[in-house]
């Protein structure tokens, strides 16, 4: 079995693939103050609750944008599963043209680009990832990474708004019923959801203008399903897209 771990600034996603399908997945908070021993207990408890044995894991792939947690999880994978994890970087085999991969490109964006190209090799694809940051990664049909755009994520924007004001409440980011809110909650929901839908459409259209190609747009991340109906340009929703990219890296490098 394969253990895939995607460490982000807000959440850590862990998932187990049995060779045919994802059989378990978990989402926990990223906390760089936690020790390796504390995370080891978390992992052991997750596996026990799911009825999985640590000895069943034969491969592990690790994608991280938090360096302190990268080292912690590398150590835990070696101690708990007695295997050396594949740590994603631009130096591994990705199925993309290496010379087009920017040195600063995050490993999560690399996984997004690789899986998009692997599943749609004849298309110019954009992956819109609704995470802590809202990221747009574009790859063409030749496996060339064309570039990326980054904006604050939806929840990040709401948190910044609420923390910087005295009277605005925290709200659930569901589909708005109106663009003209009559209370604070309706108004924030309208501004964020419709505003970000417009942001996504604008980035798609500008990228198409620059590349001269019609984009195949893939959405992933926590709020992708909520906002997709407002965007109108999403061709495919795939909540496991980044993890599938990690699984691809494991198949190409183990």
Image (spheres, rainbow, N blue to C red):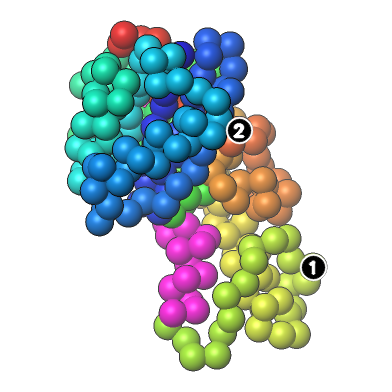
Q: CA distance from mark 2 to mark 1?
A: 25 Å
Q: Is residue 127 above or below residue 196?
A: above
Q: Is residue 99 magenta?
A: no
Quarter of the figure with residue 168: bottom right
Residue 172 in the image: x percent, y percent? 64, 66
Residue 98 in the image: x percent, y percent? 26, 20
Quarter of the figure with residue 180: bottom right
Residue extending farthest right: 177
Residue 51 in the image: x percent, y percent? 55, 25
The residue that appears at 50% across and 23% down in the rendered structure is 52
Q: Is residue 10 above or below residue 244?
A: below
SS at mark 1? loop
Whether residues under marks 2 and 1 lie with C-beta atoms below 8 angstroms apart, the answer is no
Q: Which residue is mark 2?
A: 238
Q: Which residues, given as a range, are shown in magenta?
A: 145-163
Q: Earlier in the sequence, mark 2 or mark 1?
A: 1
Residue 85 shows up from this direction: yes
Residue 97 shows up from this direction: no
The residue that appears at 48% across and 77% down in the rendered structure is 161
209 lies left or right of 41: right
Q: Is residue 162 above or below residue 59?
A: below
Residue extending farthest bottom: 166
**Mark 2 packing: few (<14 Cα in 10 Å), some, or many (20+)?**
some
The residue that appears at 56% across and 47% down in the rendered structure is 222
Q: Which residue is mark 1?
A: 177
Q: Is residue 223 above or below residue 215?
A: below
Number of numbered callouts drawn: 2
Residue 171 in the image: x percent, y percent? 62, 72
């Amino acid at each position: 079995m394969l253990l895939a771990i995607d460490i982000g600034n807000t959440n850590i996603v862990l998932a187990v693939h049995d060779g045919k399908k994802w059989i378990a997945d978990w989402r926990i908070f990223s906390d760089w103050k936690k020790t390796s021993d504390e995370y080891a207990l978390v992992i052991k408890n997750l596996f026990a609750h799911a009825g999985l044995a640590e000895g069943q894991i034969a491969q592990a792939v690790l994608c991280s944008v938090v360096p302190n947690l990268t080292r912690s999880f590398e150590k835990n994978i070696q101690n708990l599963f007695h295997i050396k994890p594949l740590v994603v970087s631009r130096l591994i085999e990705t199925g993309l043209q290496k010379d087009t991969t920017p040195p600063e490109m995050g490993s999560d964006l690399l996984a997004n680009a690789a899986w998009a190209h692997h599943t749609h090799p004849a298309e110019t694809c954009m992956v819109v990832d609704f995470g802590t940051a809202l990221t747009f990664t574009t790859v063409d049909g030749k496996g060339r990474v064309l570039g990326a755009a980054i904006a604050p994520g939806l929840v990040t924007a709401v948190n910044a708004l609420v923390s910087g004001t005295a009277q605005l409440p925290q709200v659930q980011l569901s589909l708005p019923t109106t663009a003209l809110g009559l209370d604070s909650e309706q108004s924030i929901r309208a501004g964020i959801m419709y505003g970000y839908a417009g942001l996504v459409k604008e980035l798609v259209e500008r990228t198409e203008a620059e590349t001269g190609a019609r984009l195949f747009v893939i959405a992933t991340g926590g709020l992708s399903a909520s906002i997709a109906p407002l965007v109108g340009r999403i061709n495919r929703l795939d909540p496991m897209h980044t993890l599938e990219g990690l699984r691809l890296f494991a198949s190409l490098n183990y």
